[in-house]
Amino acid sequence: MKSVVNPGSVAVFFVIAISGYAFPVFADGYIGVGVGEATINVCSDLQASGATTCDENDTGFKLFGGWRLNENLAIEGSYSDHGEVDASAPGFRVTAGATALAISVKGAWELANSFSVFGRLGYARWDTDVSITNLGSADDNGYDSTYGLGLEYSLTETLGVRGEWERTSFDSDDVDLLSINLVYRF
């Protein structure tokens, strides 16, 4: 029997395994919620297939939690809902929704008192649901990269707000989320 090992899972396991030796073990936990504008970048493909109208922007949201391994490094897991694309042409209408479950390594650098900039790189499990009038529906899923950049401001020792842009690849299409997030640190 052939064994298949997911390379993203191996990388996450390795980072967590060495963190006990290289960093204080899970020094600070945090959770958060965010909302913003999601863009599922597929309108050019749909218009090439005959769509006469297409709206690829919708409200998206995310839930996340993580552990700061030290002042500059964290492991973060998230769930994001990227809303829906709505396209139509004479005789049909297409709606497509996208969600992702991700794990990322987040690097942060303090700029000044209470301000920090961060970047993230990770791996996502994504799902899409597509519905076409009079033809039915289909879904697809897969694994791909996710990355992002942001700025965080600490309101207090336990409460912060951050603005973030992140991109998740869904096979050959990209999904962006530009969000404002509330962070609660333990």
Image (spheres, helix red, strand yellow):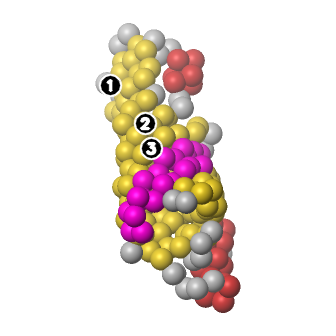
Q: Eyeballing the image, is 7 above or below 167?
A: below
Residue 167, position as x, y percentages in the image? 57, 45
Residue 137, position as x, y percentages in the image? 36, 37
The structure residue drawn at horizontal position 39% and vertical position 18%, both measured from the top left corner, is 88
The structure residue drawn at horizontal position 47% and vertical position 69%, both measured from the top left corner, is 66
Q: Sort mark 3 into few (<14), some (14-19) or many (20+) by Cα contacts within 10 Å.
A: many
Q: Which residue is mark 3?
A: 179
Considering every residue shown, the one lying at the far bottom of the view is 21
Q: In the figure, is residue 4 to the left or right of 129?
A: right
Magenta segment boundaries in residue numbering: 149-169
Circle 3: residue type: Ser
Q: Which residue is mark 1?
A: 133
In terms of sequence position, does the residue under pointer 2 or pointer 3 come before the other? Answer: 2
Q: Whole-Å distance between the Cαs marked 2 and 3?
A: 6 Å
Q: Is residue 102 part of the magenta span, yes or no?
A: no
Q: Which residue is mark 2?
A: 37
Looking at the image, which is closer to me, 93 or 175? 175
